[in-house]
Image (tube, grey):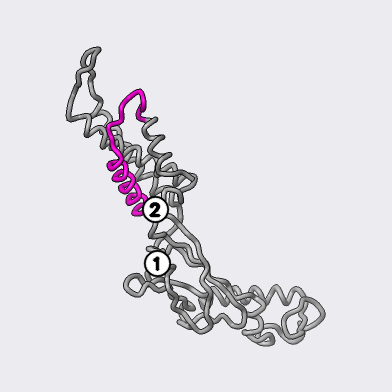
Amino acid sequence: MVTREEIIKEIKADLGHPTIKVEIDEDVWDVLLAKTIRWFKAKKGLIATTTIPLIDGSNRYDWPVDAYAITDVILPRRSDINDIVSLGFFDIIPASYVIGGSSVPGGMRIDMSAYVMLLQSLEMRRRIFSSEPDWYVEDHPTRKIIIAIKASNVVYSVNTSPLHMIVKYKKTTLEVTDLLGRDEDLFYRYMLAKTKVMLGTIRSKFSTYPTAGGSVTMDGDSLKNEGFSELERLDIEIDDSQGNAGGIVIG
């Protein structure tokens, strides 16, 4: 975890401070920080995770209050045991297979080969009829997560067990202290590059300045060009850093 003051101190050191003066005041540091936050939020954002309880008979759920984009919703799979009961045991397994062996609800017992056959049938049923729950989101103004059974459009049922969906989303807020690992590194390098562009712009207004030892040539243009090149590379790198995080799914 890093703070605003630590980032600014490190950037100054990378630019040669205190041996070399860094001509940026406190107000400008705030501007650079705000620009970097906007870039990070627009390009990647901070991913958060929460759980939302599923309500029996309901298929519309509010977004997390601090979300501006839903990246993924993980729904609980209906257990194979519950599917065995809901399908009707003897509709799938012949009565001749009901012997001592693996247990299922209701006191019935089947041998292992019949149980394996039953699970294979359940998997085929999911693939053919798309009976597993699916999700999509509605953006503004409703901002709802919609849960449904694919193809059949049946509302997802929780039955008797309290279940939750796991929701991954991009947060509307971003503080420097929230950043960790690679995100912190990307953020710092972008702010450093923006600082180089701004500092280069300031220094390029004068090609030289007088000192007691003679004139000193300013590095404004080269510093500014270096910053622009780094910004371009960082745009590509932050896109690559997201992997398969996904984005909003519109039904």
Question: What element does badge 2 sit on?
Answer: loop
Horizontal side, residue 96 vs residue 163: left or right: right
Q: Is residue 22 visible?
A: yes
Q: Which residues are magenta?
A: 15-44
Residue 78 part of the magenta-drawn span: no
* The stretch drawn in magenta includes residue 41: yes
Q: Position of residue 162 (x, y in %)?
A: 59, 77
If you read the primary sequence from the N terminus, does the residue marked by circle 1 or circle 2 appear first? Answer: 2
The x, y position of residue 31, in whole percent, is 29, 45
Q: Say what secondary structure mark 1 lies in.
A: loop
Amino acid at dot 1: Val
**The quarter of the displayed image where residue 186 is located:** top left
In the image, what residue occupies the spot 36% across and 26% down?
Answer: 18
Along the line of sight, the residue nearer the viewer: 148 or 48: 48
42 versus 226 height, above or below? below
Q: In the orientation shown, which residue stands out farthest toward the right? A: 100
Main SS of the magenta part reads helix
Up-down relation of residue 223 to residue 54 (above or below): above
Residue shown at the point (28%, 37%) measured from the top left: 25
Q: What amino acid type is highlighted by mark number 2?
A: Lys
Which labelled disc corresponds to residue 44? 2
Mark nearer the viewer, 1 or 2: 2
Of residues 156 and 207, which is closer to you in this image? 207
When the figure is inspected, residue 67 is found, relative to residue 36, above or below; the finding is: below
| Residue 223, x across and y down, in percent | 28, 30
C-alpha distance separating marks 1 and 2: 16 Å
Measuring from the top left, give residue 175's x and y in whole percent: 41, 52
Q: Circle 1 sits on which residue?
A: 249
Quadrant for the C terminus, please: bottom left
